């Protein structure tokens, strides 16, 4: 039993809204569906690429100097907003303004793990 090709992941989550309130998910699936015009395959591809980027940025963040952190945070902020990872985007935006804040770096990395764990539950990447 498959999902119709035009149906978005936002409507194929096991358990639907009973699993976790949409606003508490690390990815706004409605936003993602709008960005990908409901193309489920594109959603999965975008999320996998995003997760790779998130992991790369998170790995580089700890040892980076302030200028590099600002650049990494800015890049992550844009892509996170694009896929609907709004909490991650917010942390990245805050880090842009305070690149030396080690607690903020730790918070961003923790949210990055949460986002990628969520992506792993809804994709095969």
Image (spheres, helix red, strand yellow):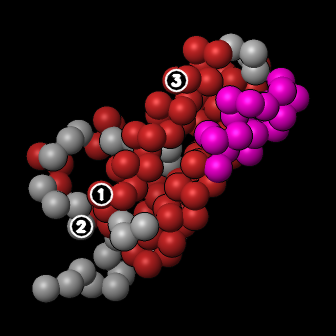
**Residue 21 falls in image quadrant:** top left
Q: Residue furthest right?
A: 67
Which residue is nearer to you in this view: 10 or 115?
Answer: 115
The structure residue drawn at horizontal position 45% and vertical position 40%, both measured from the top left corner, is: 113
Q: Secondary structure beneath disc 2? A: loop
Labelled disc at residue 12: 2
Q: Earlier in the sequence, mark 3 or mark 2?
A: 2
Query: Quick check: is 11 in the magenta stretch?
Result: no
- The relative height of residue 95 versus residue 13 in the rendered view (above or below) is above
The structure residue drawn at horizontal position 27% and vertical position 84%, both measured from the top left corner, is: 4
Image quadrant holding the C terminus, namely: bottom left
- Quickly name the residue at label 1: 121
Q: Position of residue 9 (x, y in %)?
A: 33, 66
Q: Position of residue 14 (x, y in %)?
A: 16, 61
Image quadrant holding the N terminus, namely: bottom left
Q: Earlier in the sequence, mark 1 or mark 3?
A: 3
- The relative height of residue 28 versus residue 23 in the rendered view (above or below) is below
Q: Secondary structure beneath disc 1? A: helix
Labelled disc at residue 107: 3
Specify the principal SS of the magenta part. helix
Specify whether 98 is left or right of 115: right
């Amino acid at each position: 039993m498959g999902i119709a090709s035009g149906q978005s992941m936002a409507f194929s989550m096991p358990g639907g809204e009973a699993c976790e309130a949409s606003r508490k998910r690390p990815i706004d699936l409605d936003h993602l569906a709008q960005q990908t015009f409901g193309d489920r395959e594109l959603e999965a591809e975008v999320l996998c690429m995003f997760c790779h980027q998130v992991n790369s940025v998170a790995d580089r963040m700890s040892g980076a100097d302030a200028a590099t952190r600002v650049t990494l945070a800015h890049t992550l902020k844009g892509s996170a907003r694009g896929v609907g990872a709004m909490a991650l985007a917010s942390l990245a935006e805050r880090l842009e303004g305070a690149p030396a804040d080690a607690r903020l770096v730790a918070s961003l990395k923790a949210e990055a793990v949460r986002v990628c764990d969520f992506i792993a539950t809804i994709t095969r990447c």
